[in-house]
């Protein structure tokens, strides 16, 4: 059974800073499967990292293929980047995965690892 209020935190870091966050937010909002599920929030730097408060994206998860849609959309967005970009996706239990533009076939990789990060309560890997 899926916990209520489950969400994934998406941190974007790269050469273009908050412009990349805005770009990804616009990209995800353009995906009809994710529309209304992604918001932007302020977040302090992660432990051990110096820096200012930055924005993160928060994706509300649920059934109906949302995690698969998120993986596909994140992979497609990463493939459009011309500068180095790193995505860190953190699931509700703190598990996380980090990917950057140098990853080959990022969509396939995301489809494999993202469900394990954001839906560890599901044993069969389906969403």
Image (cartoon, grey):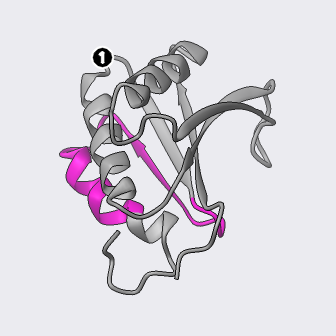
13 magenta-colored = no
From the viewer's perspective, is residue 73 above or below residue 14? below
User: Within 10 angstroms of label 1, few (less than 14), some, or many (20 or more) residues?
Assistant: few
- The residues colored magenta run 91-114
From the viewer's perspective, is residue 46 above or below residue 86? below
Q: Residue at x 61, y 33 (%)?
A: 39
Q: Nearer the viewer, residue 65 or 19?
A: 65
Q: Residue at x 29, y 37 (%)?
A: 102
State left or right for residue 125 relative to residue 37: left
- Residue 52 lies, in percent from the top left, at 80, 24
108 magenta-colored = yes
Q: Choose top left, top right, bottom left or bottom right for residue 125.
A: bottom left
Disc 1 target residue? 82
- Residue 65 lies, in percent from the top left, at 32, 59
Quadrant where the C terminus is found in the figure: bottom left
Q: Residue at x 52, y 50 (%)?
A: 89
Q: Choose top left, top right, bottom left or bottom right for residue 104.
A: top left
């Amino acid at each position: 059974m899926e916990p209520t209020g489950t969400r994934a935190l998406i941190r974007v870091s790269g050469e273009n800073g908050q412009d990349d966050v805005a770009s990804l937010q616009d990209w995800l909002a353009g995906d009809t499967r994710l529309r209304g599920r992604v918001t932007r929030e302020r977040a302090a730097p992660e432990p051990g990292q110096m820096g200012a408060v930055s924005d993160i994206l928060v994706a509300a998860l649920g059934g109906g293929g949302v995690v698969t849609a998120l993986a596909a959309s994140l992979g497609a967005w990463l493939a459009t980047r011309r500068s180095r970009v790193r995505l860190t996706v953190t699931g509700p239990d703190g598990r996380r995965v980090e990917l950057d533009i140098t990853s080959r076939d990022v969509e396939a990789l995301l489809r494999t690892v993202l469900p394990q990060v954001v839906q560890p309560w599901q044993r069969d890997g389906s969403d």
